[in-house]
Amino acid sequence: MQTKTVAFTSCAALLLSLLAGCGSPSTSAPSSATPAPAGGSTQPPANTGQTPPAAAPAPAPAPAPAQKTTLTLMVGNNGTLYPALQAVAAEAEKKLNITIKFDIKPDGTEGDNLVKTRLATGDMDDILAYNSGSLLQAISPETNFVDLTGEAYMSNLLDSYKTTVTAGGKVFGVPAGSSNVGAVLYNKKAYADLGLTIPKTWAEFMANNEKIKAAGKTAIIASYKTTWTSQLFVLADFYNLQKQVPNFAQDYTAGKAKYATTPAALRGFEKTAEPFKKGYYNKDFQATTYDAALKMLAEGTGVQYPMLTSAIDALNQNYPDKVKDIGVFALPSDSADINGLTVWMPTSLYINKKGKNVDAAKKWVEYFISPEGQAVFTSKSKASGPYVVKGIKLPDSTYEGVKEMQQYFDAGKTGPALEFVSPVKGPNLESILIETGSGLKSPQDSAADYDKDVLKQAKQLNLPGW
């Protein structure tokens, strides 16, 4: 499939519109709730103070049909996305007489492979909750999903978001949640007890790690049992990379730039390996799950966790009395002059073009993205970053950790993750980085392996230069 490349500078400019549309300061991870990426068993309070969109409302859904329609919706079982969608489904059933049967998929590469298999065999659900950006491009949206470009509610979505769910000039998705950030989550009480300050450089970060280790605590929590969590030192480092090599995304997409031969890009692999060599990871990190990692962070036995900020919502589910103790800081670069956040766009909902109930699915998605549907959704899933639906603002009840992110946004020190400015992302990064972070392979060899991994993906996308 021919994919249109989005330049970094263009997407970075669009991120400014995200902030302008979201106003005041301020998805989520694996959980063992009722099948509920990121979160536990206790749902957050029903009234979180979110403000529903004030923009021109979408047309009212058509009257409910006399006969009930059943749709299937595939979603991951981590965080508050699943329970929030359940809440919307319950209200939509009353309004539309449409029932949702949820199909829970695994996270990480296993989930990606399942989605690809279902699409290839024609066995995909009516609606799919899945990534925006490069992972969407890898599953041929023009072939598999319904074009939503002409829907009235599209005017309520920020352009910075729509770009990430667009292929061939057509928009295929609607956002299911807020944006979020790749950063370091830290236990503020532990930091205070140990007299630590927020590090602005990698050297300062490693010095903090040494002090934490000396105090008998885990300095950096790793949770490789949940394989996708191994990627954060590389993916969240992209803000630092693009500041040093502004054309990296463009050259990477064109097949000119490589991780193994670009020192600033290789740095993320080195940052994955260095804490292992120093003994800063938890001893059982290869057997530690995402849920277990969140428990360590909440209790302060582990002090820092490189992770997406969607994890804060997951923490609130399982440890509501501890979530105020969790802060956020940018993954440090090697220079204090380069210090900012890498931003992820939200998971999106897509309608299966080959489904048997496309019209009903369109009505359900229309309700979901309406002011009423968004009010229900945001009452069950608090923000982990700015929203991409116009009119939804971050309330005073926003998590403290999310509020700490605002300084970076206000200072313009944010940039989109690589997967939103390039369609190229290899499927095996998480397994490669598990080897890197376990001392089984050098950062240089791991980066070279990933360059080979993305080569396959780029050729599948028919990108020029590969």
Image (spheres, rainbow, N blue to C red):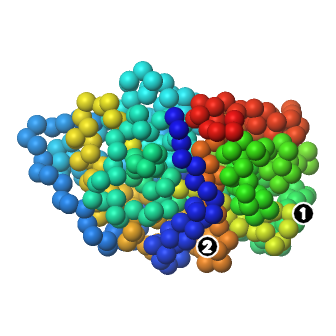
Q: Is residue 280 left or right of residue 165?
A: right
Q: Which mark is residue 409?
A: 2
Q: Amino acid at mark 2?
A: Phe
Query: Which residue is denoted by mark 1 in the rendering?
Result: 203
Residue at 48%, 24% in the rendered image: 117
Residue plotted at (87% across, 56% down): 213
- The mark nearer the N terminus, 1 or 2, is 1
Q: CA distance from mark 1 to mark 2?
A: 24 Å
Please state the horizontal and vertical placement of residue 436, each as a whole percent of the image. Answer: 82, 38
Q: Quadrant of residue 206?
A: bottom right
The residue located at (24%, 34%) in the rendering is: 357
* SS for callout 2: helix
Tell which residue pokes out farthest to the front in this image. Answer: 464
Q: Residue furthest top?
A: 121
Q: Is residue 374 above or below residue 457?
A: below
Residue 368 in view here: no
Q: Residue 296, relative to residue 36: is it above or below?
A: below
Q: Residue at x 39, y 62 (%)?
A: 157
